[in-house]
Structures are given as C-alpha cells and as structure tokens.
Image (cartoon, helix red, strand yellow):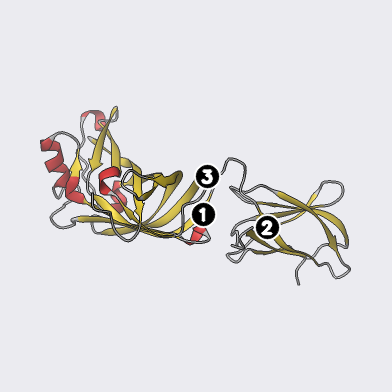
Amino acid sequence: MTGLRARIGTAEGWAVENAVLTVTDMSGRQVARAVADATGAVATEPLPPGTYTAVVTAAGYTPVAKTAQISSDGGGSLDEVPLAPAAGAIELPPPGPWTIDPVHSTVVATALHLGIASVKARFSEVGGRITIGRPVERSSVHAEIKAASIDTGIKMRDDHLRSPDFLDVETYPTIAFESSGLRRRGADTWTLAGELTLHGERRPVELELTYGGYGSDAWGGVRVAFHAETQLHRKDFAINYNAIARAGVAVVGTTVKIEIDIEAVQGESLPQM
C-alpha cells in the first residue's frame, strides 16, 4: 500500500529519475520523502488523511509545489508532474552519435613528484564515441587512449613512463573507458560512472562532468564540449612503482589527478577537412 503517488517527467514526456518528492503538513513539518525511479514514478508511505503540500525537486530543474489530498485509505495522487529546466540551464545537445575529435581533445594526468611538486603528462591520442540519449541519462560513452602517446616534455621521463615500471605500453597499448550510468548534479554538471581499463586492470570510476554546450563549427559541422575530472590510485591498476627518496617520501605519488577536455562532432565519423 502506498501514500502519495506521482510520475515526474519533463515537458517533452521524458522521465526524471532521482527527482525528490517531499511532503509537509500544514504546519510545515516534513512527513514524507521519496525518490523517483527510472520511470519517474515515486510514492511515499501511507499518510494520515488530510491536506498536505508536496514539493518536487530535481537537479537542473525548477522546483514544483502542489497541494495534495490524502484520502481515508492513506493514499493520494498528483498524477503527472512536469518539470521545467532551471533558469540559466544550458540547452542539451541533440540526440544521436557524436565522434570524439582527437585534435581538439586532451587528457592530462597530474602526479605529485617528491611530495612537493606536480608533474603533468598529456595523452595526445584519444578517440571514441558519445551517444546522446533521451532522456539524457541514457547517454553512453566509449573512449580509448593510446598509452604510448603520453608526453611530459622530457623524453627520458616519457620512456620511463612507457616502461613496465608504469604503463607498460608494449603489453597494454590501450587505455579504455566504458560508461555505465549518468546522473545529474546541477544545471550543467553530471556524474559519469563507468569502468576504466588501464594496465590490464578494469576498475569502476566516476568522472565529475561539466557540459560546455554545443554549436556550429567553421567546417559545417556541429560540436559539443565537455570537461571531466577524477582521481585514480596507481595501485588500483597494479602500477606499483615505489622508489623512495629522502625521508621515505615517494618519488611519484600514488594518487593521480585526471583532467579531460573533449570536443565531439555530431555524426558517425569525423568530417574531412
């Protein structure tokens, strides 16, 4: 048996997963809270009969407040509750396939050196495909990086990073990411979950994703831009190089910050320029 029920969606009819239904009594006291499922359906526990205020909220959308009547059986319904994008929200890109443009995309890894300074390494060969879905939470990402394309600006250091001490690019030439879920955190921010395959190890990761918008380019195409960040632990991927310098300080830190800037072109392939 359920209490107050609703189905939360956009004006276009797409479900808004993880929308929150909060119910307060006439004194303003919260009496129930429930979270919408993947279909946008939400329901509270049974409530005492009477009149309540129901507020629906979701990241990136304008809150909606409604008056709700609960009958003698403890239940009631708000039916369909449409949510409008929050003021200032960026228009989402059109659905369909988008191809990552390696010329305008970068992946930068930053690690601590000797506990006092940071070293940045850029991967210059990145590619893959983004499929924008509707609702956008159904979008997916597949990306690959050529491990040997790592570049810190110093050949000797780059050769060491390509060696079996670190990436072992001869054995593991590709770093791959496959998304498994997307959840909204704000008007233009998301958490992109997936699995990263690195150095022969496959581990779950989450990327904090910022959407930059989309628009036409100078070659007659349409482009979309994203920025993403995460932190990785080398030992999770069996990269266990642990040379020690003075006073027990590691030469290379065990935590690596990853920053990703992606441009993708609408369509199944990159245009000829």
Who comes first in sequence, dot 2 or dot 3?
2
Query: Which residue is rendered at x = 83% and y = 55% of the image?
Result: 52
Judging from the image, what secondary structure is the residue with disc 2 in? strand
Residue 26 in view, yes or no: yes
| Residue 63 in picture, x, y percent from top left | 69, 48
| Amino acid type, mark 2 | Pro
| Amino acid type, mark 3 | Ile
Label 2 and label 3: CA atoms lie apart by: 18 Å
Residue behind mark 2: 82
Who comes first in sequence, dot 1 or dot 2?
2
Locate residue 45: give its quadrant: bottom right
Q: Residues within 10 Å of mark 1 (few under 14, many from 20)?
A: some
Q: Is residue 260 left or right of residue 186?
A: left
Residue behind mark 1: 183
Residue 197 in view, yes or no: no
Residue behind mark 3: 90
Q: Is residue 209 above or below residue 153?
A: below
Q: Nearer the viewer, residue 40 or 110?
A: 40
Query: Which residue is rendered at x = 47% and y = 61% of the image?
Result: 133
| Residue 131 in picture, x, y percent from top left | 40, 60
| Residue 215 in picture, x, y percent from top left | 42, 45
Q: Is residue 207 left or right of residue 158?
A: right
Q: Residues within 10 Å of mark 3 (few under 14, many from 20)?
A: some
Query: Which residue is rendered at x = 30% and y = 37% of the image?
Result: 110
Q: Nearer the viewer, residue 70 or 10?
A: 10
